Image: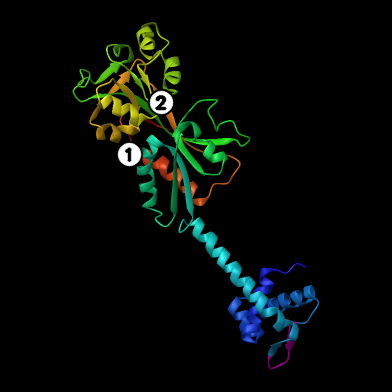
Amino acid sequence: MNLTLRQLRAFVAVADTGSFTEASRQLHLTQSALSVLVREMERELGVRLFDRSTRRVSLTEAGAELLPAVRRMLTDLAGAVASVSELRDKRRGVLRLAAPQLMACTLLPRLVADWRGRFPDVEVRLADTPPEHLLATLHEGEAELAIGPDRGPGSDGETGDQALERYVLLEDRHWLVCPADHPLRKRKRVRWNELGPWPFIAPTRDFVRRVLPELQGEGDAVARAILSPPAMEVSYMTTAMGLVAAGLGVTACPTYSESLVRAHGLHMVALEAPAFYREVSIYRLANRAMSPAAESFVDNAMDYVRRHPSRGARVSQT
């Protein structure tokens, strides 16, 4: 059986008005076109739906039996279309995000607040997760978008059956973090190989692994010695900042953590030779269509970092 939506609407309109003339006017059809739709529906069903006379049109027993079901069907369809329209227009829905703890309390709140200013009715669910598990939240269905620094090949969650697509938000440089009364406090920039007198606190477990390949020049032997091994190695940037605030050494942080650095009463100085940059991206599963909310969040986030450039960070032009 192959009934069309136009046939069902024609049937209900004739049943409601009791007139082909009035029904055709409501549906903006010619009377002959409306009659064709009703006859096709009757032929498809194998029964007459209306008794026709020169004065009136009335439902047959079969037509009266069918009418409530068709009404429900059209009502349900209209509700489903309205619901999809609300999702499309971001008047409802859920946006599921994941980010490492540091980003979840620094950059991401600004991105979410800017986006929610445009779409306040969409619910946002944020999973602040360990960096090494960030991309696994996509494969496990916990998040639709994951926002975080590039973790390089071999990280947990990057080697799944489902390919990832990423959008580079910016290239964020690393800065020296030191106490406000530190001898390097007033410097505009500091070279890595000048950090020898002060214990270095690696802010994450993979920090040294990522930085050492950047220190390959002849003058970098001192810097490699500082980092291999570091004085201390911790799992979270907040821990490293607490240790620096206690006078136990210096550390390095990305630009987007500046608000947290200030909250600890610490100071940031540009690190050079080399200037170490790391891409910050939005990740998603490539084989799944993005929800309207997620698609608009990506566009808004890319626009936000262009409108609010961070010092030292390079914004992606893609």
Within-10-Å neighbours for mark 2: few <14, some 14–19, many 20+: some
Q: For the residue labelled by badge 2, is the local secondary structure a helix, a strand or a loop?
A: loop
What residue is pinned by disc 1?
A: 308
Q: Which residues are magenta?
A: 49-56
Q: Secondary structure at mark 1?
A: loop
- Residue 309 spot, x, y in % from top left: 33, 35
Q: Position of residue 176 (x, y in %)?
A: 30, 22
Q: Main secondary structure of the magenta part?
A: loop
Q: Is residue 175 positioned above or below 305 on the image?
A: above
Q: CA distance from mark 1 to mark 2?
A: 27 Å
Q: Amino acid at mark 2?
A: Thr
Colour scheme employed for the rendering of this structure: rainbow
Q: Is residue 65 left or right of residue 229?
A: right
- Quadrant for residue 111, please give it: top left
Residue identifier under label 2: 204
Residue closer to the observer: 143 or 314: 143
Residue 8 among those drawn in magenta: no
Position of 153 with respect to 253 (left or right) is: right
Residue at horizontal 32%, vertical 39%?
Answer: 308
Could you say which is closer to the camera, residue 114 or residue 126?
Answer: 126
Q: Position of residue 118 (x, y in %)?
A: 38, 53
